[in-house]
Amino acid sequence: MTQEIITIENKTGIHARPASIFVQTATKFKSKVQIQAKGKTVDAKSILMIMSMGLVKGTEMTIVADGPDEAEAVKALKDLVASKFGEE
């Protein structure tokens, strides 16, 4: 299992467009990918689950992956969040 903690920095947090990009990226990997934040754990390949978390700027979240390409999955998703989803 590989995991990384990252803080959401883009102004609008993870709303529909960033959530869609996040899910599209997560589904490229075979590993099981989850997000942990606010005491909840959700499937990172489900846009509805991500949207239900209400991830706003400043929220700390943990990206967790378990499987054959877990390290690549976590790195790709961490880099995506760090890039502020190309919004700024």
Image: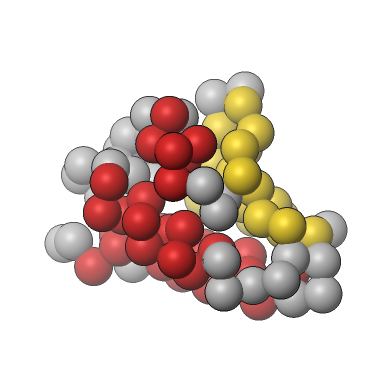
Instruction: From the viewer's perspective, tell me whether residue 49 is left or right of residue 42.
Output: left
Q: Residue at x 21, y 42 (%)?
A: 12
Please name the residue shown 56% across and 66% down the image: 27
Q: State which quarter of the image contains the N terminus.
A: bottom right
Q: Position of residue 31 (x, y in %)?
A: 74, 65
Give coordinates of residue 87: x percent, y percent: 18, 61
Q: Is residue 53 visible?
A: yes
> Splitting the image into 4 quarters, where does residue 32 fall?
bottom right
Residue 53 appears at what percent x and percent y?
Answer: 45, 30
* Residue 71 visible in the snapshot: no
- Colour scheme employed for the rendering of this structure: secondary structure
**Quadrant in the picture for the C terminus:** bottom left
x, y percent for residue 52: 43, 29
Instruction: Give the side of residue 43 with respect to residue 67, left or right.
Output: left
Above or below, 14 relative to 75: above
Quarter of the image where one finds residue 82? bottom left
Instruction: Looking at the picture, tell me which residue is in the foreground, 57 or 50.
Output: 50
In the image, residue 69 sits, relative to residue 41, either above or below, namely: below
Please count the marks in the image.
0
* Residue furthest to the top: 39
Residue at figure coordinates x 52%, y 47% from the top left: 46
- Work out whether residue 17 or residue 73 is closer to the camera in this orientation and state it: 17
